[in-house]
Image (tube, rainbow, N blue to C red):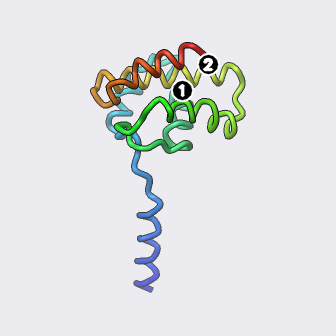
Amino acid sequence: VAETEEDLLEDEQQEEHIPAVEESVYKKYVELVPAEKQEQVEEDLDVFLVDFQPPPVAEWDLRLVKRFMNKWFIENANPLEEDLYSMRESLLSLFQFLAEEKLLPDTLLAQAEKYLQSE
């Protein structure tokens, strides 16, 4: 039995995904979101951070953002126009917060703002 438990533990550890953004940082961000937008922002970011599973934030670049918005999100979430708008707004807000916290790669904020606001 012990062998089986060890096998299960190993499987669980392999499946564990390193969160792209530390939970404490994410919680701090969510607390800053206006109450009326909180639920929508959390839903959007859950899709990006949990379902899409991006690499750790230090590795993010514009290609990742474009791949998520133009390919993954459209193929997997079948979003309406307002969903796309909401996702762009939520990502921008998160990126701005992460930049203030000095966690976002230096060049990404300006690129992401330009890209997400031009859509």
Mark 2: which secondary structure? Answer: helix
The residue depicted at 47 percent of the width and 22 percent of the height is: 112
The residue depicted at 72 percent of the width and 34 percent of the height is: 78
Circle 1 or circle 2, nearest the eye: 2
Q: Is residue 2 above or below residue 101?
A: below
User: Amino acid type of disc 2?
Assistant: Tyr
- Name which quarter of the figure residue 105 lies in: top left
- Picture coordinates of residue 102, whole percent (x, y): 27, 27
Residue pointed to by mark 2: 85
- Picture coordinates of residue 24, whole percent (x, y): 32, 37
**Badge 1 vs badge 2, beta-carbon distance below 8 Å:** no
Say which quadrant the N terminus sits in. Answer: bottom left
Q: In terms of depth relative to the viewer, which is nearer, 40 or 75?
A: 75
Residue pointed to by mark 1: 39
- Picture coordinates of residue 110, whole percent (x, y): 41, 17
- Name which quarter of the figure residue 82 lies in: top right
Q: Tell me which label, 1 or 2, sits earlier in the chain.
A: 1
Q: Is residue 36 above or below residue 74?
A: above
Q: In terms of depth relative to the viewer, which is nearer, 73 or 1?
A: 73
Give the tally of numbered discs.
Answer: 2
- Picture coordinates of residue 59, whole percent (x, y): 38, 39
Mark 1: which secondary structure? Answer: helix
User: Amino acid type of disc 1?
Assistant: Glu
Instruction: Report whether 80 appears left or right of 91.
Output: right
Which label is found at residue 111?
none
Distance (Cα) linking label 1 and label 2: 15 Å
Instruction: Report whether 87 appears left or right of 9.
Output: right
